[in-house]
């Protein structure tokens, strides 16, 4: 592969009180790629991101950004990074524009023109003159994004950027991140629990669970590996029993809900047998349908496999 790694994690471990919060992480993000960092609550995403932006130290291993080590060459490495970790850092009593100007002063080479251009690109021109305390949560997120992009970083890191955005805001953010990666060659790392959104936005996914990286794959391969699943709708009162019968066939239940909808990892050839078993046990089956697994289905499946 001749792809250019903008960021590379090498055997990264974070240990606090003798416990490894994350352990031996190895992955890279290339220029022009949106990388989705997925994992359940407490998996270690924010911890990893904090190390990537130098908010906390690395216990073992190293992180290289455009070839510069975040541990030994921090100033050079961090120049290439724009980030929002959890919430954007903004001064509430200042206007949006003043916030951007204040930030620009700390980074050489950012003029008025660049501030206005970046703000315009993200469509927030009109309310830049209002104080940030009057902004909604979504407006603050957007201002934070402008701030993170002001110095034209080659790596953009966003920890849960969809927090507080309305559906239109999420849609726009998705397009902006894709534009930045695909048209401007930025490497983007984004973590979010909105998996349907991540499926539309990301080129690659890294899945972390209990501090360990389970897989790094192109999103297409990751979802395709799940293959097809079968959605079975039974009488809601019989859901449990139906799940048990399917499990007894050695097949995995991906999800089941109170409406009687069961999603199972069945092969096409298993369907007649499953159907027969259900019928013979007196389960009322309302529908059986095959469907391509979504990112969410695949994610849940992988989580369970690695429990
Ligand atoms: N400063 C700290 N000291 C000790 N443990 C910590 C510290 N910060 C985080 N942890 C622990 O590290 C683990 C990973 O937390 P982290 O915030 O990285 O998870 P996350 O993947 O970002 O989760 P979420 O999806 O909820 O944001 C958790 O078990 C958490 O309790
Ligand atoms: Mg987090």
Image (spheres, rainbow, N blue to C red):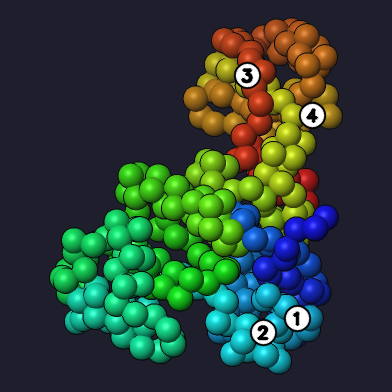
31 on left or right of 201: right
Cα–Cα gap, marks 1 and 2: 7 Å
Write down the residue under mark 1: 62
Q: Quadrant of residue 66?
A: bottom right
Using the image, tell me which numbered label, if any, was put on residue 128: none
Q: Position of residue 14 (x, y in %)?
A: 71, 80
Q: Are marks 1 and 2 in contact (CB under 8 Å)?
A: yes
Q: Earlier in the sequence, mark 1 or mark 2?
A: 1
Q: Nearer the viewer, mark 1 or mark 3?
A: 1
Q: Quick check: is the Cβ at mark 2 less than 8 Å away from ligand 1?
A: no
Cα–Cα gap, marks 4 and 2: 45 Å
10 Å crowding of disc 4: few (<14), some (14-19), many (20+): some
Determine the residue positioned at 59% across, 11% down: 287
Cα–Cα gap, marks 1 and 4: 41 Å
Question: Which of 285 and 93 lies nearest the eye of the viewer?
Answer: 93
SS assignment at label 1: strand
- Up the image or down, 90 lies above or below 234; here it is below
Q: Earlier in the sequence, mark 3 or mark 2?
A: 2
10 Å crowding of disc 2: few (<14), some (14-19), many (20+): many
Determine the residue positioned at 31% across, 85% down: 102
Write down the residue under mark 3: 232
SS assignment at label 2: loop
Q: Are marks 3 and 2 in contact (CB under 8 Å)?
A: no
Q: Are marks 1 and 3 in contact (CB under 8 Å)?
A: no
Cα–Cα gap, marks 1 and 3: 47 Å
Cα–Cα gap, marks 3 and 2: 50 Å
Q: Nearer the viewer, mark 3 or mark 2?
A: 2
247 on left or right of 32: right
Write down the residue under mark 2: 70
Write down the residue under mark 4: 251
Determine the residue positioned at 35% across, 44% down: 167
Cα–Cα gap, marks 3 and 4: 13 Å
């Amino acid at each position: 592969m001749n792809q250019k790694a903008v960021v590379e994690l090498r055997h990264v471990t974070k240990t606090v009180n003798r416990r490894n919060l994350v352990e031996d992480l190895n992955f890279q993000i290339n220029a022009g790629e949106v990388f989705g960092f997925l994992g359940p609550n407490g998996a270690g995403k924010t911890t990893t991101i904090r190390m990537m932006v130098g908010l906390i130290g690395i216990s073992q291993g190293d992180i290289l950004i455009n070839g510069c080590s975040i541990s030994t060459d921090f100033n050079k490495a961090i120049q290439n990074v724009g980030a929002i970790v959890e919430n954007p850092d903004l001064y509430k009593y200042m206007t949006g524009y003043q916030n951007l100007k204040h930030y620009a002063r700390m980074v050489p080479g950012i003029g008025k023109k660049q501030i206005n251009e970046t703000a315009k690109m993200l469509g927030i021109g009109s309310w830049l003159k209002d104080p940030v305390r009057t902004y909604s949560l979504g407006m603050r997120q957007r201002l934070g994004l402008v701030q993170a992009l002001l110095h034209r970083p080659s790596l953009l890191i966003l920890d849960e950027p969809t927090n507080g955005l309305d559906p239109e805001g999420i849609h726009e953010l998705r397009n902006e991140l894709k534009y930045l990666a695909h048209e401007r060659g930025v490497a983007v790392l984004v973590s979010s629990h909105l998996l349907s959104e991540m499926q539309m936005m990301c080129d690659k996914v890294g899945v972390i669970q209990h501090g360990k990286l389970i897989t790094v794959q192109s999103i297409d391969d990751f979802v395709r590996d799940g293959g097809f699943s079968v959605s079975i709708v039974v009488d809601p009162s019989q859901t449990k029993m139906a799940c048990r019968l399917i499990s007894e066939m050695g097949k995995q239940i991906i999800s089941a809900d109170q409406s009687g909808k069961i999603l199972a990892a069945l092969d096409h050839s298993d369907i007649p047998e499953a159907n027969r078993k259900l019928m013979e046990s007196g389960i009322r089956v309302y529908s059986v349908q095959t469907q391509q697994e979504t990112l969410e289905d695949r994610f849940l499946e992988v989580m369970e496999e690695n429990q």
